[in-house]
Image (cartoon, rainbow, N blue to C red):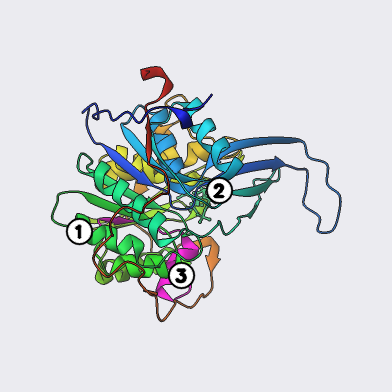
Amino acid sequence: MAPLDDDCVRRPYRRVAVVILTLTLNPSLDRTIEIASLTRGAVIRAATARLDPGGKGVNVSRALLANSVVSRAVVPFGGDEGRQLVHLLWQQGLDMVTVPVAGRTRSNVTLAEPDGTVTKINEPGTALSPAELDTIADTVLAEAHEADWVVASGSLPPEVPADVYARLCRRFAGAGIHVAVDTSGPALASALDAGPALVKPNLEELAGVTGRPILCVGDVVEAAVQLRAAGARTVLASLGADGAVLVEEQGIWYGEATVTEPRSSVGAGDAMLAGFLAGGARGEAALVEALAWGAAAVRLPGSRMPGPGDIRRDGVRTGRPDPARLLTSAVWSEAADPNPAGPSLTGPDHLGPAGAGLGEPGHHPPPASR
Ligand SMILES: Nc1ncnc2c1ncn2[C@@H]1O[C@H](COP(=O)(O)OP(=O)(O)OP(=O)(O)O)[C@@H](O)[C@H]1O
Ligand SMILES: O=P(O)(O)OC[C@@]1(O)O[C@H](CO)[C@@H](O)[C@@H]1O
Protein backbone atom coordinates (compact mmCIF):
# COMPACT_ATOMS: atom_id res chain seq x y z
CA MET A 1 0.00 0.00 0.00
CA ALA A 2 0.86 3.54 0.18
CA PRO A 3 4.18 4.94 0.89
CA LEU A 4 4.02 5.24 4.66
CA ASP A 5 6.39 2.37 5.27
CA ASP A 6 8.74 3.19 2.42
CA ASP A 7 12.30 4.31 2.87
CA CYS A 8 12.79 8.02 2.80
CA VAL A 9 14.03 8.80 -0.71
CA ARG A 10 15.22 12.29 -1.50
CA ARG A 11 15.08 13.17 -5.13
CA PRO A 12 16.22 16.45 -6.72
CA TYR A 13 13.60 18.48 -8.51
CA ARG A 14 13.48 18.08 -12.25
CA ARG A 15 14.20 21.70 -13.20
CA VAL A 16 11.65 22.67 -15.84
CA ALA A 17 10.50 26.20 -15.15
CA VAL A 18 9.30 27.15 -11.69
CA VAL A 19 9.39 24.87 -8.68
CA ILE A 20 6.62 25.33 -6.15
CA LEU A 21 6.63 23.93 -2.62
CA THR A 22 3.32 23.94 -0.77
CA LEU A 23 2.70 23.75 2.97
CA THR A 24 -0.66 22.68 4.39
CA LEU A 25 -0.58 22.76 8.18
CA ASN A 26 -4.23 21.68 8.42
CA PRO A 27 -4.95 19.24 5.57
CA SER A 28 -8.21 17.30 5.33
CA LEU A 29 -10.17 14.50 3.82
CA ASP A 30 -12.90 16.28 1.85
CA ARG A 31 -16.21 14.47 1.51
CA THR A 32 -18.54 16.10 -1.01
CA ILE A 33 -22.20 15.07 -0.90
CA GLU A 34 -24.46 16.19 -3.74
CA ILE A 35 -28.06 16.75 -2.61
CA ALA A 36 -31.21 18.10 -4.32
CA SER A 37 -31.64 20.81 -1.68
CA LEU A 38 -30.59 21.50 1.87
CA THR A 39 -33.30 21.48 4.54
CA ARG A 40 -32.23 21.97 8.15
CA GLY A 41 -33.43 19.21 10.45
CA ALA A 42 -34.46 16.84 7.63
CA VAL A 43 -33.12 13.44 6.58
CA ILE A 44 -31.67 14.13 3.15
CA ARG A 45 -30.89 11.34 0.68
CA ALA A 46 -27.70 12.07 -1.20
CA ALA A 47 -27.50 11.85 -4.98
CA THR A 48 -23.74 11.19 -5.05
CA ALA A 49 -20.79 11.29 -2.70
CA ARG A 50 -17.05 11.53 -3.32
CA LEU A 51 -13.89 11.74 -1.28
CA ASP A 52 -10.97 13.97 -2.22
CA PRO A 53 -7.70 14.65 -0.50
CA GLY A 54 -7.91 18.24 0.67
CA GLY A 55 -6.48 21.28 2.34
CA LYS A 56 -5.54 24.39 0.47
CA GLY A 57 -1.83 23.81 -0.16
CA VAL A 58 -2.52 20.18 -1.03
CA ASN A 59 -5.03 21.38 -3.64
CA VAL A 60 -2.54 23.85 -5.09
CA SER A 61 -0.07 21.00 -5.55
CA ARG A 62 -2.80 18.76 -7.02
CA ALA A 63 -3.74 21.46 -9.55
CA LEU A 64 -0.10 21.98 -10.51
CA LEU A 65 0.39 18.23 -10.87
CA ALA A 66 -2.67 18.02 -13.12
CA ASN A 67 -0.97 20.56 -15.38
CA SER A 68 2.53 19.08 -15.23
CA VAL A 69 4.00 21.94 -13.20
CA VAL A 70 6.71 20.81 -10.79
CA SER A 71 5.53 20.96 -7.20
CA ARG A 72 6.09 19.24 -3.89
CA ALA A 73 3.68 19.24 -0.96
CA VAL A 74 4.61 19.17 2.73
CA VAL A 75 1.77 17.30 4.44
CA PRO A 76 1.45 16.58 8.17
CA PHE A 77 -0.81 13.59 8.74
CA GLY A 78 -2.20 11.63 11.69
CA GLY A 79 -4.58 8.80 12.53
CA ASP A 80 -6.55 6.64 10.09
CA GLU A 81 -7.81 9.71 8.24
CA GLY A 82 -4.26 10.92 7.81
CA ARG A 83 -3.16 7.57 6.40
CA GLN A 84 -6.09 7.64 3.99
CA LEU A 85 -5.18 11.17 2.94
CA VAL A 86 -1.60 10.17 2.16
CA HIS A 87 -2.80 7.08 0.33
CA LEU A 88 -5.16 9.13 -1.87
CA LEU A 89 -2.42 11.63 -2.63
CA TRP A 90 0.02 8.87 -3.44
CA GLN A 91 -2.56 7.27 -5.77
CA GLN A 92 -2.88 10.60 -7.57
CA GLY A 93 0.87 10.71 -8.01
CA LEU A 94 1.55 13.73 -5.83
CA ASP A 95 5.17 14.47 -4.98
CA MET A 96 5.04 15.02 -1.22
CA VAL A 97 6.94 14.99 2.03
CA THR A 98 4.77 13.61 4.80
CA VAL A 99 5.29 14.44 8.47
CA PRO A 100 3.64 12.11 10.99
CA VAL A 101 1.86 13.89 13.86
CA ALA A 102 0.02 12.57 16.91
CA GLY A 103 -3.38 14.18 16.24
CA ARG A 104 -5.97 12.91 13.77
CA THR A 105 -6.19 14.57 10.35
CA ARG A 106 -9.59 16.27 10.04
CA SER A 107 -12.50 15.44 7.76
CA ASN A 108 -14.38 18.30 6.09
CA VAL A 109 -17.84 17.95 4.55
CA THR A 110 -19.32 19.81 1.60
CA LEU A 111 -23.03 19.75 0.75
CA ALA A 112 -23.38 20.71 -2.91
CA GLU A 113 -26.75 21.65 -4.44
CA PRO A 114 -27.53 21.62 -8.18
CA ASP A 115 -27.62 25.44 -8.48
CA GLY A 116 -23.99 25.60 -7.32
CA THR A 117 -24.78 26.47 -3.69
CA VAL A 118 -22.17 24.95 -1.43
CA THR A 119 -22.46 24.47 2.34
CA LYS A 120 -19.18 23.53 3.94
CA ILE A 121 -18.44 22.19 7.41
CA ASN A 122 -14.74 22.28 8.28
CA GLU A 123 -13.41 20.63 11.42
CA PRO A 124 -10.90 22.70 13.39
CA GLY A 125 -8.24 20.00 13.07
CA THR A 126 -6.21 18.75 15.98
CA ALA A 127 -3.49 20.67 17.72
CA LEU A 128 0.15 20.45 16.65
CA SER A 129 2.65 20.42 19.47
CA PRO A 130 5.55 22.91 19.33
CA ALA A 131 7.88 19.99 18.55
CA GLU A 132 5.67 18.81 15.68
CA LEU A 133 5.50 22.33 14.36
CA ASP A 134 9.27 22.59 14.49
CA THR A 135 9.63 19.33 12.56
CA ILE A 136 7.26 20.60 9.88
CA ALA A 137 9.06 23.94 9.71
CA ASP A 138 12.43 22.20 9.40
CA THR A 139 11.02 20.06 6.59
CA VAL A 140 9.84 23.14 4.72
CA LEU A 141 13.21 24.82 5.19
CA ALA A 142 15.06 21.73 3.97
CA GLU A 143 12.89 21.40 0.88
CA ALA A 144 12.59 25.10 0.07
CA HIS A 145 16.16 25.78 -0.96
CA GLU A 146 15.40 24.40 -4.41
CA ALA A 147 12.04 26.15 -4.74
CA ASP A 148 11.12 29.42 -6.40
CA TRP A 149 7.88 29.67 -4.45
CA VAL A 150 6.70 28.45 -1.07
CA VAL A 151 2.90 28.47 -0.83
CA ALA A 152 1.60 28.54 2.76
CA SER A 153 -2.11 27.87 2.57
CA GLY A 154 -5.13 27.27 4.74
CA SER A 155 -6.24 27.62 8.32
CA LEU A 156 -4.00 26.90 11.28
CA PRO A 157 -4.82 23.95 13.53
CA PRO A 158 -5.54 24.74 17.20
CA GLU A 159 -2.59 25.96 19.28
CA VAL A 160 -0.44 26.88 16.29
CA PRO A 161 0.79 30.45 16.78
CA ALA A 162 -0.80 32.94 14.40
CA ASP A 163 2.57 34.25 13.24
CA VAL A 164 3.80 30.91 11.83
CA TYR A 165 3.40 32.04 8.19
CA ALA A 166 4.98 35.39 9.03
CA ARG A 167 8.07 33.62 10.35
CA LEU A 168 8.30 31.56 7.18
CA CYS A 169 8.15 34.74 5.08
CA ARG A 170 10.92 36.35 7.13
CA ARG A 171 13.02 33.24 6.92
CA PHE A 172 12.91 33.20 3.13
CA ALA A 173 13.23 36.95 2.57
CA GLY A 174 16.56 37.61 0.90
CA ALA A 175 17.03 33.98 -0.19
CA GLY A 176 15.27 34.57 -3.51
CA ILE A 177 12.37 32.36 -2.45
CA HIS A 178 8.96 33.96 -2.81
CA VAL A 179 6.27 33.17 -0.28
CA ALA A 180 2.57 33.14 -1.21
CA VAL A 181 0.10 33.14 1.67
CA ASP A 182 -3.55 32.10 1.44
CA THR A 183 -5.11 32.19 4.87
CA SER A 184 -7.49 34.22 6.98
CA GLY A 185 -7.87 36.20 10.19
CA PRO A 186 -4.90 36.71 12.51
CA ALA A 187 -2.61 34.45 10.45
CA LEU A 188 -3.17 36.63 7.37
CA ALA A 189 -2.85 39.89 9.30
CA SER A 190 0.39 38.74 10.85
CA ALA A 191 1.82 37.46 7.55
CA LEU A 192 1.30 40.85 5.89
CA ASP A 193 3.73 42.43 8.28
CA ALA A 194 6.43 40.00 7.10
CA GLY A 195 6.16 41.14 3.47
CA PRO A 196 4.90 38.10 1.51
CA ALA A 197 5.41 38.17 -2.24
CA LEU A 198 1.75 37.31 -2.77
CA VAL A 199 -1.47 37.00 -0.81
CA LYS A 200 -4.73 35.59 -2.18
CA PRO A 201 -7.62 36.70 0.01
CA ASN A 202 -11.22 35.92 -0.92
CA LEU A 203 -13.97 38.46 -0.21
CA GLU A 204 -14.52 37.46 3.42
CA GLU A 205 -10.80 37.42 4.12
CA LEU A 206 -10.36 40.83 2.49
CA ALA A 207 -13.21 42.29 4.55
CA GLY A 208 -11.98 40.56 7.70
CA VAL A 209 -8.38 41.69 7.51
CA THR A 210 -9.15 45.28 6.46
CA GLY A 211 -12.24 45.64 8.66
CA ARG A 212 -14.14 47.33 5.83
CA PRO A 213 -17.26 46.37 3.89
CA ILE A 214 -16.60 45.13 0.36
CA LEU A 215 -19.58 45.97 -1.82
CA CYS A 216 -18.12 46.87 -5.20
CA VAL A 217 -14.96 46.41 -7.27
CA GLY A 218 -13.68 49.79 -6.06
CA ASP A 219 -13.85 48.51 -2.46
CA VAL A 220 -11.81 45.45 -3.49
CA VAL A 221 -9.16 47.62 -5.12
CA GLU A 222 -8.94 49.91 -2.09
CA ALA A 223 -8.71 46.96 0.30
CA ALA A 224 -6.02 45.33 -1.85
CA VAL A 225 -4.05 48.59 -1.94
CA GLN A 226 -4.34 48.62 1.87
CA LEU A 227 -2.86 45.08 2.01
CA ARG A 228 0.03 46.20 -0.20
CA ALA A 229 0.63 49.15 2.12
CA ALA A 230 0.64 46.66 5.00
CA GLY A 231 3.41 44.62 3.37
CA ALA A 232 2.16 42.29 0.60
CA ARG A 233 3.93 42.78 -2.72
CA THR A 234 1.09 41.43 -4.87
CA VAL A 235 -2.57 40.94 -3.97
CA LEU A 236 -4.72 38.53 -5.96
CA ALA A 237 -8.23 38.98 -4.57
CA SER A 238 -10.67 36.24 -5.53
CA LEU A 239 -14.30 37.30 -5.71
CA GLY A 240 -16.12 34.01 -6.32
CA ALA A 241 -18.51 34.32 -9.28
CA ASP A 242 -17.53 38.00 -9.59
CA GLY A 243 -14.03 37.07 -10.80
CA ALA A 244 -10.81 38.51 -9.41
CA VAL A 245 -8.76 41.68 -8.94
CA LEU A 246 -4.99 41.74 -9.23
CA VAL A 247 -3.10 44.61 -7.60
CA GLU A 248 0.67 44.65 -8.04
CA GLU A 249 3.48 47.11 -8.53
CA GLN A 250 2.98 47.21 -12.30
CA GLY A 251 -0.75 47.86 -12.24
CA ILE A 252 -4.28 46.87 -11.39
CA TRP A 253 -6.43 44.44 -13.39
CA TYR A 254 -9.91 43.01 -13.09
CA GLY A 255 -11.02 39.78 -14.73
CA GLU A 256 -13.82 37.24 -14.81
CA ALA A 257 -14.82 33.99 -16.47
CA THR A 258 -18.45 32.95 -16.70
CA VAL A 259 -19.38 29.48 -15.56
CA THR A 260 -22.87 28.56 -16.75
CA GLU A 261 -23.11 25.29 -14.84
CA PRO A 262 -21.18 25.55 -11.57
CA ARG A 263 -20.71 22.16 -9.93
CA SER A 264 -18.56 22.87 -6.86
CA SER A 265 -16.55 25.94 -5.99
CA VAL A 266 -14.57 24.08 -3.32
CA GLY A 267 -10.90 24.45 -4.15
CA ALA A 268 -11.54 27.03 -6.89
CA GLY A 269 -9.36 29.50 -5.02
CA ASP A 270 -6.58 26.93 -4.80
CA ALA A 271 -6.79 26.13 -8.51
CA MET A 272 -6.75 29.85 -9.16
CA LEU A 273 -3.63 30.39 -7.08
CA ALA A 274 -1.94 27.46 -8.82
CA GLY A 275 -2.85 28.92 -12.22
CA PHE A 276 -1.50 32.33 -11.25
CA LEU A 277 1.86 30.88 -10.19
CA ALA A 278 2.01 28.59 -13.22
CA GLY A 279 1.23 31.60 -15.41
CA GLY A 280 4.24 33.56 -14.19
CA ALA A 281 2.72 35.23 -11.11
CA ARG A 282 2.65 38.68 -12.64
CA GLY A 283 0.46 40.85 -14.82
CA GLU A 284 -2.58 40.28 -16.98
CA ALA A 285 -1.33 37.01 -18.51
CA ALA A 286 -1.02 35.38 -15.08
CA LEU A 287 -4.47 36.72 -14.14
CA VAL A 288 -5.95 35.12 -17.28
CA GLU A 289 -4.38 31.81 -16.30
CA ALA A 290 -5.65 32.15 -12.72
CA LEU A 291 -9.22 32.85 -13.84
CA ALA A 292 -9.19 30.02 -16.37
CA TRP A 293 -8.01 27.49 -13.75
CA GLY A 294 -10.46 28.82 -11.11
CA ALA A 295 -13.45 28.66 -13.48
CA ALA A 296 -12.44 25.17 -14.61
CA ALA A 297 -12.39 23.98 -10.98
CA VAL A 298 -15.92 25.32 -10.47
CA ARG A 299 -17.17 23.20 -13.38
CA LEU A 300 -15.84 20.02 -11.73
CA PRO A 301 -17.36 18.03 -8.84
CA GLY A 302 -16.00 18.14 -5.30
CA SER A 303 -12.53 19.59 -5.08
CA ARG A 304 -11.32 17.89 -8.26
CA MET A 305 -8.52 19.95 -9.74
CA PRO A 306 -8.66 20.83 -13.45
CA GLY A 307 -6.21 19.53 -16.02
CA PRO A 308 -5.37 20.93 -19.47
CA GLY A 309 -8.55 19.42 -20.99
CA ASP A 310 -10.74 21.33 -18.49
CA ILE A 311 -9.11 24.75 -18.74
CA ARG A 312 -10.58 27.23 -21.28
CA ARG A 313 -8.74 30.49 -21.64
CA ASP A 314 -11.04 31.89 -24.34
CA GLY A 315 -13.84 32.39 -21.79
CA VAL A 316 -11.76 34.79 -19.69
CA ARG A 317 -12.23 38.57 -19.92
CA THR A 318 -9.76 40.98 -18.32
CA GLY A 319 -9.33 44.73 -18.32
CA ARG A 320 -9.28 47.82 -16.16
CA PRO A 321 -11.49 47.52 -13.09
CA ASP A 322 -14.79 49.42 -13.01
CA PRO A 323 -14.81 50.70 -9.41
CA ALA A 324 -18.59 51.21 -9.41
CA ARG A 325 -19.39 47.64 -10.38
CA LEU A 326 -21.39 46.02 -7.58
CA LEU A 327 -20.48 42.54 -6.40
CA THR A 328 -23.15 39.83 -6.38
CA SER A 329 -21.78 38.49 -3.09
CA ALA A 330 -20.92 41.65 -1.21
CA VAL A 331 -19.52 41.39 2.31
CA TRP A 332 -20.95 44.14 4.47
CA SER A 333 -18.56 44.19 7.39
CA GLU A 334 -16.33 42.01 9.43
CA ALA A 335 -14.02 43.50 12.01
CA ALA A 336 -10.32 42.82 11.64
CA ASP A 337 -8.64 41.27 14.65
CA PRO A 338 -6.99 44.13 16.57
CA ASN A 339 -4.28 41.87 17.98
CA PRO A 340 -3.38 39.53 15.18
CA ALA A 341 0.03 38.13 15.97
CA GLY A 342 -0.76 35.77 18.87
CA PRO A 343 1.85 34.33 21.22
CA SER A 344 4.99 32.72 19.80
CA LEU A 345 5.86 29.20 20.86
CA THR A 346 9.27 28.97 19.28
CA GLY A 347 10.65 32.50 19.32
CA PRO A 348 10.19 35.44 17.00
CA ASP A 349 12.37 34.73 13.99
CA HIS A 350 13.40 31.20 14.65
CA LEU A 351 11.52 28.22 13.36
CA GLY A 352 13.23 25.97 15.88
CA PRO A 353 15.10 22.68 15.82
CA ALA A 354 13.51 19.43 14.74
CA GLY A 355 11.26 17.84 17.36
CA ALA A 356 12.39 14.55 18.85
CA GLY A 357 10.67 11.20 18.79
CA LEU A 358 7.81 12.09 16.47
CA GLY A 359 8.88 10.15 13.42
CA GLU A 360 10.90 11.33 10.49
CA PRO A 361 9.36 13.16 7.58
CA GLY A 362 8.97 10.76 4.65
CA HIS A 363 9.48 11.83 1.10
CA HIS A 364 7.35 9.99 -1.39
CA PRO A 365 8.15 10.16 -5.06
CA PRO A 366 4.99 9.77 -7.11
CA PRO A 367 4.19 6.19 -8.18
CA ALA A 368 5.08 6.83 -11.81
CA SER A 369 8.67 7.68 -10.93
CA ARG A 370 9.29 4.65 -8.74
N1 LIG B 1 -19.56 30.63 -9.58
C1 LIG B 1 -18.40 30.94 -10.19
N2 LIG B 1 -18.38 31.28 -11.49
C2 LIG B 1 -17.22 31.58 -12.12
N3 LIG B 1 -16.03 31.58 -11.53
C3 LIG B 1 -15.98 31.27 -10.23
C4 LIG B 1 -17.16 30.94 -9.49
N4 LIG B 1 -16.79 30.66 -8.23
C5 LIG B 1 -15.45 30.82 -8.19
N5 LIG B 1 -14.97 31.18 -9.38
C6 LIG B 1 -13.57 31.42 -9.77
O1 LIG B 1 -12.72 30.84 -8.81
C7 LIG B 1 -11.98 31.86 -8.13
C8 LIG B 1 -11.83 31.50 -6.67
O2 LIG B 1 -13.11 31.46 -6.07
P1 LIG B 1 -13.36 31.96 -4.57
O3 LIG B 1 -13.21 33.44 -4.48
O4 LIG B 1 -14.66 31.36 -4.15
O5 LIG B 1 -12.11 31.31 -3.83
P2 LIG B 1 -11.93 30.76 -2.36
O6 LIG B 1 -12.96 31.34 -1.44
O7 LIG B 1 -10.51 30.94 -2.03
O8 LIG B 1 -12.25 29.22 -2.62
P3 LIG B 1 -11.66 27.93 -1.88
O9 LIG B 1 -11.27 28.37 -0.49
O10 LIG B 1 -12.77 26.94 -1.87
O11 LIG B 1 -10.51 27.48 -2.70
C9 LIG B 1 -12.75 33.15 -8.39
O12 LIG B 1 -11.90 34.27 -8.32
C10 LIG B 1 -13.27 32.92 -9.78
O13 LIG B 1 -12.27 33.18 -10.73
O1 LIG C 1 -10.27 25.20 6.90
P1 LIG C 1 -9.37 25.80 5.82
O2 LIG C 1 -7.96 25.34 5.96
O3 LIG C 1 -9.51 27.27 5.70
O4 LIG C 1 -9.91 25.24 4.43
C1 LIG C 1 -9.89 23.88 4.18
C2 LIG C 1 -10.62 23.60 2.89
O5 LIG C 1 -11.97 24.06 2.94
O6 LIG C 1 -9.96 24.31 1.85
C3 LIG C 1 -9.93 23.54 0.66
C4 LIG C 1 -10.60 24.30 -0.43
O7 LIG C 1 -9.93 25.49 -0.65
C5 LIG C 1 -10.60 22.22 0.99
O8 LIG C 1 -9.92 21.16 0.38
C6 LIG C 1 -10.57 22.13 2.49
O9 LIG C 1 -11.62 21.37 3.03
Confirm if mark 1 falls within 8 A of ligand 1.
Answer: no
- Identify which residue is drawn at 32% across, 31% down: 69
Residue 271 can be seen in this image: no
- Disc 1 marks which amino acid? Glu
Magenta segment, which residues?
A: 196-213
**Relative to residue 300, is residue 64 drawn left or right?**
left
Q: Is residue 128 above or below residue 212?
A: above
Q: Residues within 10 Å of mark 1 (few under 14, many from 20)?
A: few
Q: Is residue 347 above or below residue 168?
A: below
Q: Nearer the viewer, mark 1 or mark 2?
A: 2
Mark 3 → mark 2, Cα distance in angstroms: 29 Å
Query: Which residue position is annotated with label 2?
Result: 105
Query: Which residue position is annotated with label 3?
Result: 207
User: In terms of image quadrants, where is residue 344?
Assistant: bottom left
Residue 292 can be seen in this image: yes
- Which quadrant is home to the C terminus? top left
Residue 187: horizontal and vertical position, in percent? 40, 66
User: Is 73 part of what is drawn in magenta?
Assistant: no
Q: Which mark is residue 230?
A: none
Q: Residues within 10 Å of mark 3 (few under 14, many from 20)?
A: many
**Relative to residue 151, is residue 48 drawn left or right?**
right
Confirm if mark 3 falls within 8 A of ligand 1.
Answer: no
Residue 337: horizontal and vertical position, in percent? 44, 77
Mark 3 / mark 1, whichever is N-terminal: 3
Query: Which residue position is annotated with label 1?
Result: 249
- Disc 3 marks which amino acid? Ala
Mark 3 / mark 2, whichever is N-terminal: 2
